[in-house]
């Protein structure tokens, strides 16, 4: 399970780095050409740069909730 977590963490970091690089490339190309395609690609890439990490965090949060981690156990009261 530990190896799976490491692989998923590396994939996540790779996706975020790829989004950052694509955003920079599309922004530079748009500044030089003023092409409508690169404007839309830049905006979509910038949007995904913020949306993908949030989506991944929400998936991990829901996974922890379903597994019961991070939830305080109710104290047993003896009567």
Image (spheres, rainbow, N blue to C red):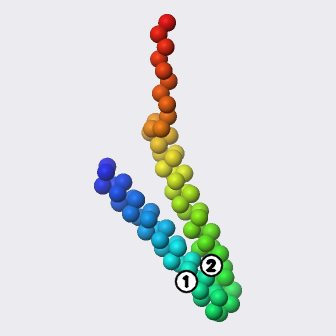
List x then y, in percent, for residue 14: 43, 68
Badge 1 or badge 2: first in the primary sequence: 1
* Disc 1 + disc 2, Cβ < 8 Å: no
Q: Which mark is on residue 25?
A: 1
Q: Would residue 5 be found to the left or right of residue 12 on screen?
A: left
Numbered label tally: 2
Kindly tell me whether residue 66 is visible in this rendering: no
- Can you say whether 51 is above or below 57 in the image? below
List x then y, in percent, for residue 20: 52, 73
Q: Which mark is on residue 42?
A: 2
Task: Please tell me which residue is depicted at 48% across the width and 73% down the height of the picture.
Answer: 18
List x then y, in percent, for residue 79: 49, 6
The secondary element bearing badge 1 is classed as helix
Task: Please tell me which residue is depicted at 51% across the width and 56% down the height of the picture.
Answer: 56
List x then y, in percent, for residue 51: 59, 62
- Can you say whether 44 is above or below 67 in the image? below
Residues under labels 1 and 2: Cα distance? 8 Å
Task: Please tell me which residue is depicted at 51% across the width and 77% down the height of the picture.
Answer: 21
Task: Please tell me which residue is depicted at 52% across the width and 72% down the height of the picture.
Answer: 19
């Amino acid at each position: 399970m530990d190896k799976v977590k490491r692989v998923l963490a590396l994939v996540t970091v790779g996706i975020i780095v790829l989004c950052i690089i694509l955003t920079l490339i599309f922004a530079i190309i748009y500044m030089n050409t003023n092409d409508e395609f690169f404007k839309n690609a830049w905006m979509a890439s910038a949007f995904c740069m913020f949306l993908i990490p949030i989506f991944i965090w929400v998936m991990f949060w829901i996974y922890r909730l379903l597994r019961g981690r991070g939830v305080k156990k109710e104290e047993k009261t003896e009567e």
